Amino acid sequence: MAGRTPRRRREFGTVRKLPSGSWQARYLGPDGQRHTAPETFGTKTDAQNWLNLVRADIERNQWTDPDAGAINFTKYTERWLRERGLAPTTVDRYQGLLRLHILPAFGALDLDEIAAPAVRAWRAERLQATGATTVAKSYRLLKAILQTAVDDELLRTNPCRIKGAGTEHADERPVATIEQVFALADAMGPRWRLMVLLGAFASLRPEELAELRRHSVDLEECSLRITHASPELTNGRRVTGPPKSRAGRRTVHLPDFLLPELRRHLQWFAEKEPDGLLFVGEKGAPFRRSTFGRKWRRARAKVGMPDSFRFYDLRHTGNTLAADTGAKLKDLMVRAGQSSERAQLIYQHSTVKHQRKLAQGIDAAVRQGLPKAPSAGPKVRGM
């Protein structure tokens, strides 16, 4: 009896020769749909080899729908922003980076049309057009969005593969001297004087200063309770809510020389209601970034400070001054309201005793730094 002829293994997919002479490969995918290779091949063997690779991916459970990435990048980023649960200020910042730096290059493309060479070319062009720090932030955002597309199985790999491209190498922020801080406070005028001093000697963020209220102030303890922040978005809308991290909720003990400044400001400029704002404009409305910015630029020029010195650099000044007192890292973090994954390993509840000691150290440093600092505080002799 003749032996049975071995059954020939069924071929995976089909190849056919096109009128142009090139070869086309097609196959039935795990999704039950017929898929065509994204390109044609010069020979039948090349087309068959491509099918063999696809079949191997299917057998290893590594196959992805080649049409899954046919989603417009702009639409995908809109969904990405909605689903992240981001703070309004973060959304505002990301939208700015997308609008100015990312969407002009990739907004019209589908996800699977964004290739590594295009990302490299885009980054090189951006480095010629804007600052390296902005480019690094834009690259990190682009990489994060496309990594989510990989996680969603819309892309096989992330085309953002430039080593170190998302790392920022920003210049060290400038630090003002004690005399310069008081000169800026004088130049800003009585209404905004305390804001400058708190920005520096209490290390408060601008959005925290914007939401300080009468009930935030404890004159007996000479301290401020930070419970809310009110950042202003680029469209002018304020978003009031808790600080950006849990560590942002804190009590900041102030140097004693600020107590007369606090009393005077509460009497002259703060809203009179118990929950009234500490800082309001001449017409009684919450201060606006644009209006305050004009005053700040004039004061900065009057004092002779460089144009690169931002109001936020007062916080950097205060943090540096506090560190110079010899305070422990955990105390500095509590005072500045700083929190991060790395810092959580060190962060502990800081005692009031340490916070008062830190404030007293700043008080002593300021009094020593001023040539003729009055005992009751600068420019408050009549109080």
Image: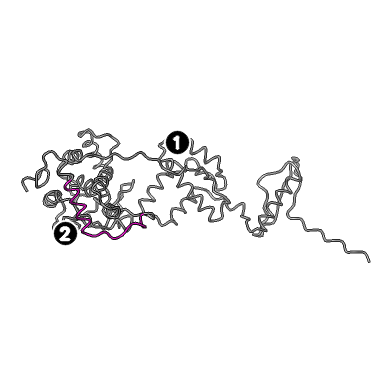
Q: Secondary structure at mark 1?
A: helix
Q: Please, is residue 58 above or below residue 37 in the view?
A: below
Name the quadrant of the N terminus. bottom right
Judging by the rendered image, the residue that carries numbered circle 2 is: 274
Image-based side of 236 in relation to 151, left or right: left
Q: Residue at x 63, y 55 (%)?
A: 63
State the mark number for residue 206.
none
Say whether residue 80 is magenta: no
Q: How is the image coloured?
A: one colour
Q: Residue at x 43, y 34 (%)?
A: 129
In the rendering, at what x and y percent does residue 21 appear?
A: 76, 40
Residue 220 or residue 157, whichever sits in front: 220
Residue 336 or residue 95, whichever sits in front: 336
* Between discs 1 and 2, the one toward the N terminus: 1
Q: Please, is residue 241 above or below residue 112 in the view?
A: below
Q: Bounds of the magenta span?
A: 343-364
Image-based side of 151 in relation to 171, left or right: right
Judging by the rendered image, the residue that carries numbered circle 1 is: 127
Q: Residue lying furthest left in this view?
A: 382
Which amino acid lies under the numbered mark 1 shown in the image of this protein? Leu
Q: Secondary structure at mark 2?
A: loop
In the rendering, at what x and y percent does residue 160 appear?
A: 52, 45
In the rendering, at what x and y percent does residue 11 appear?
A: 76, 55
Q: Are marks 1 and 2 in contact (CB under 8 Å)?
A: no
